[in-house]
Amino acid sequence: MNDPNRQLARFLSRAEKLLERIEPLLPPASSIPDWNAAIAFRWRRHGSTGYLQPITRPSTIRLHDLHDIDEQKRRIDVNTRQFLDAQPANNVLLTGTRGSGKSSLIKALLNEYAPRGLRVIEVEKSDLVDLPDIVELIDGRPEHFIIFCDDLSFDAGDATFKALKVVLDGSMASTPDNALLYATSNRRHLMPEYFEENLESKRVGDEIHPGEAVEEKISLSERFGLWLSFYPFDQDAYLNIVAHWLKSFGCGEKEIARAERDALNWALLRGSRSGRVAWQFAKDWAGTHQHKPVRTKRSK
């Protein structure tokens, strides 16, 4: 007959191993995070429960790492400093070509102003319906929070589209003074636009009034007070960004000049001259030539 004590010990051991495997899948006991654990957080869902997860290794990119977007950088920097100074500030929509530094600009702002109490909460598009819950968690906190949604776009009939409209500028409850929404998108009006929608436009006197479908799309982007547009880089701007990142990996001026032709061919193969492509080339070149970075970087 088996020893009951041994059976109990075996059972407890198996139970502990099972709990160790299940525990990472469970949400925290409270949706309120340890605010001192991180400067950036990610909104996560587990079933019907949402909670803020600290991001323990945020991007290290800085504002001076971002080149050839000086006007966009200046305008969002001014808006963010107004926000931190408890002055009127706008929600921001950053739109334009992929890889041009839109999301990197948000990350760089966090690193610049985290000592002044700036925090970022990253929210997936599908979770934007939870914005009222997120706002409730941060209301009254001494920090200032940028609620960040990357690559924001909607399909026709997307329920999240109208939910975001209400949160931005249509709810009876006002957004607290310590929260702003910064979003990036490849689409200026956040939704696909079709040729036949232009046929709905009407002439009223000497004015052209867009149709209902166009008005619906414009109405969301207009709720962002500040629009920043990003455009493809020309060859000189692209090579300037390549040079910056190669310097960060310890490459000298002669080596940077020697790398230009390869950098242009790299962009040609990728079909894009963007900041992201420049960063990827610099990593490849530095790795191939066994350079060590001057300081650790994160991708644009």
Image (cartoon, rainbow, N blue to C red):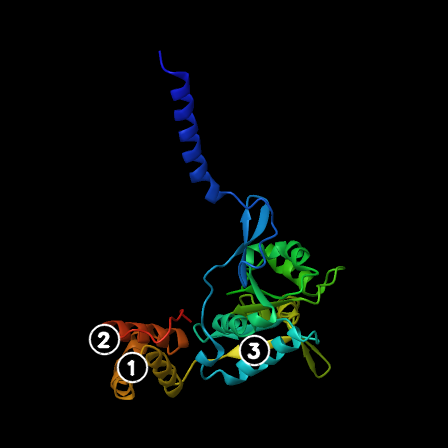
Give the residue at mark 1: 251
Mark 2 or mark 1: name the one nearer the start of the chain: 1
Question: Mark 3 — residue?
Answer: 228
The image quarter in which residue 74 lies = bottom right
User: Secondary structure beneath disc 2?
Assistant: loop
Q: Secondary structure at mark 1?
A: loop
Which residue occupies 54% across, 85% down?
71
16 relative to 31 in the view: left or right: left
Quarter of the image where the C terminus is located: bottom left
Distance CA(mark 2)–CA(mark 3): 37 Å
Q: Residue at x 74, y 63 (%)?
A: 174
Place of residue 52 in the rendered image (x, y in percent of width and height, measured from the top left): 57, 54
Q: Is residue 84 above or below residue 16?
A: below
User: Is there a contact, CB below 8 Å, between mark 1 and mark 3?
Assistant: no
Contact flag, marks 2 and 1 (Cβ < 8 Å): yes
Secondary structure beneath label 3: strand
Query: Label 2 neighbourhood size at 10 Å, few (<14), some (14-19), many (20+)?
Result: few
* Closest to the observer, 213 or 100: 100
Amino acid type at mark 3: Leu
Which residue is tagged 2? 289
Kindly report which numbered mark, 2 or 3, lies closer to the viewer in this rendering. Answer: 2
For disc 3, the neighbor class at 10 Å (few under 14, some 14 to 19, many from 20) is some
**Residue 50 locus on image (x, y percent):** 58, 49
* Mark 2 vs mark 1, CA separation in Å: 9 Å
Q: Position of residue 280 (x, y in %)?
A: 34, 72
Quadrant holding the N terminus = top left
Q: Amino acid at mark 2?
A: His
User: How far apart are the two marked residues, 1 and 3, measured between alpha carbons?
Assistant: 33 Å
Horizontal side of 107 relative to 209 (left or right) equals left
Q: Residue at x 51, y 71 (%)?
A: 111
The x, y position of residue 117, in whole percent, is 61, 69
Label 2 or label 3, whichever comes before in sequence order: 3
